[in-house]
Structures are given as C-alpha cells and as structure tokens.
Image (cartoon, grey):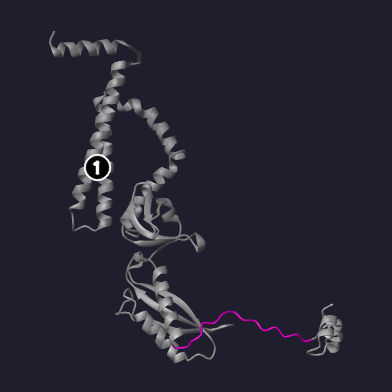
Amino acid sequence: MNLRQQITEIVRQLDMIGFDVGDYRVSVYRALLMLAVTFAVIVAGRLSAMVVRRFFRRLHRLDAAQQLLGEKIVTIIVWIALAMIGVDFLGISLTALTVFSGALGLAVGFGLQKTFGNLISGIILLMDRSIKPGDVIAVGTGADKTVGQVNRIGIRAVSVITRDKIEYLIPNELLMTSQVENWSFSSRDVRVKVPVGVAYGSDLSLVEKILLEAARNLPRVLDVRPPQVWLHAFGTNAIEFEVQMWIDDPEEGLGNLRSDLLKAVYLEFAAHGIEVPYAQHDVHIRHWPKELEKKKSRVQPGSTGEAGESST
C-alpha cells in the first residue's frame, strides 16, 4: 500500500468511530477535521490581520484614525470570509445553522450585548474622529477624573496612558455615553491657571512683574500666546492673583508646570521681601467672666504670691 492508500484507510477507520445525526456524520475524523480547520482559520485570520495592519500603516495619506478604522473594517470582513470558507470546507449546510443563528442572536441580545455595543461604539468613535490615538482626554469628574493620552482604540476598549504610566482600559461605550474632555480635539493649545496669593500691603506692580517674568521663563509656555496675570480677588488672608499660561504639549503634564512656576515665584518673592501669607485669626474678647475679672483685679504685676494665688 502506498502512502495515499494508507491515509485513506486511516481516515476510513477514524470515520467509522462515530454516529449519524440525520444526514450528518459525527465521528472522530470529523472532530479532528473540525479542529484542524478551526486552527487553520485562526492562523490565517491572524496572518491576514497582520498584513492588513501593515498595509494601512503604509498609507501615509490617511491619518491615524482613518488607518485604524480601515484596518478594523477590513479585518472584520476577512474574519467573516474565513469563517464562511471553513464552514463550507467542513460541508456544513448553512440551512443547518438556522437554529444556531437564532441561539446566537439571543446570546448577543443578552450575554454579548455589551461586547457588541463596545464594538459598534469603537467604530463610531473612529468614524466621527472625536477621539484619535495621541489625543489627551479626561474622563470623569472631580477626584475620579482620569487624564491621559490615547494609546490605542481597540474593539472593546480605549487604552489611555496617564503621566504615572498607568494604562487604563476604558470601554468604548462609556466614552460614547459620558462626558469626555478632549484637550487636543481641534487644537493642542491648553491654558493652565495657577493661583498665587500675597500679603496685604505688597507692591502689586512688582508682584505682577515677578509673576509674568517667572511664567515667561518656563520653556513650555508659548510665546505666541504670552502669559497673563490677573488680580483675581481680595481674599480673607491674601490678595489673590491668577497666572494664566498657554502650552501645546498637555501630554507632558500640568502638575510639573505649576510646580516649576511656584518654585520660581517663591524664590523671587523671598528676594524682594514679598510675603506669602498664611491664615491668621484675631480673637477679641468683649466680656470676661466675672470670676476671672475678680481674680484679675487681685493679681498685681510682678507679685509672686498673688500669681500663685491666681493660679490656684
């Protein structure tokens, strides 16, 4: 027997181990064939996705969002085509999948609703280009606000990397239904506000000059949109100024910029004798208790005995 006959005999023996379900044969051979086809479809799908990704990365006339959108759409089409080819190779009739498709529809409606919702939301985000790779976004409010740079828009979630190098995976559907701050949607210019307080009696012109000079000396501050200093309010303990600066690299962080400004301002204030105030409270006693008034009247300054009697 040649090799071909041996393989045919092995296939026949494996196919004999099984049973029939209507017109379809369930056997060991069919199971192994299904595993082999599934493996081939997965490998071909991954290789095709890699080729598609490299193809769209070379289309430099498209921006990052358009490249990613085209890549996702073509990849989905390729996976569907490979799945149909695999089903046809296994000899499974599509009419036999009617019941299965109904069950799949129920699964999508209940268990996979969020997954498909995130998939559609990701495609919509790429189509309307409201969020693109490289954008700096802020999600949430108050203390729960997350600020970071969009690293990748996936099928299920958007990858956002913060300044602490923590990578957040935010579901696409959440970005579609909640408020999102995009700091680089139409322009990368961002205004940074830094409050500064000085003591009452300070030279306001000198304070303003120092604040402006410190802001101009920061390398990240834009010269085309020069910084400004506003007298913000007469506070309880200080005269409150506000320094406003424009930058075009928000992904580099805002806290470090505020820190650099405040350190420079503090050194200049110390050199020019300008006081940085702290909270002070004056307590005025309008009426002493009668017992204390009597003891106070009996105490004579410099008298040790009277002081001892008063302390008792």
Q: Secondary structure at mark 1?
A: helix
Residue drawn at (31%, 77%) of the image = 222
| Residue 101 seen in render | yes
Q: Is residue 290 left or right of residue 21?
A: right
Residue lying at the far left of the rendered structure: 2
* Residue range of the region highlighted in magenta in the rendering: 272-286
Judging depth in this view, the residue of 143 and 129 nearest the camera is 143
* Count of numbered marks: 1
Residue placed under numbered mark 1 in the picture:
49
Judging depth in this view, the residue of 164 and 137 nearest the camera is 164
Residue drawn at (34%, 71%) of the image = 189
Tell me: residue 233, above or below residue 49: below
Q: Quadrant of residue 47?
A: top left
Q: Is residue 276 magenta?
A: yes
Predominant secondary structure, magenta span: loop
Q: Position of residue 202 (x, y in %)?
A: 50, 90
In the rendered image, the quadrant that contains the C terminus is: bottom right
Residue drawn at (37%, 52%) of the image = 158
Q: Position of residue 63 (x, y in %)?
A: 24, 58
Q: Is residue 144 magenta?
A: no
Q: Position of residue 71 (x, y in %)?
A: 25, 48
Q: Position of residue 301 (x, y in %)?
A: 79, 90
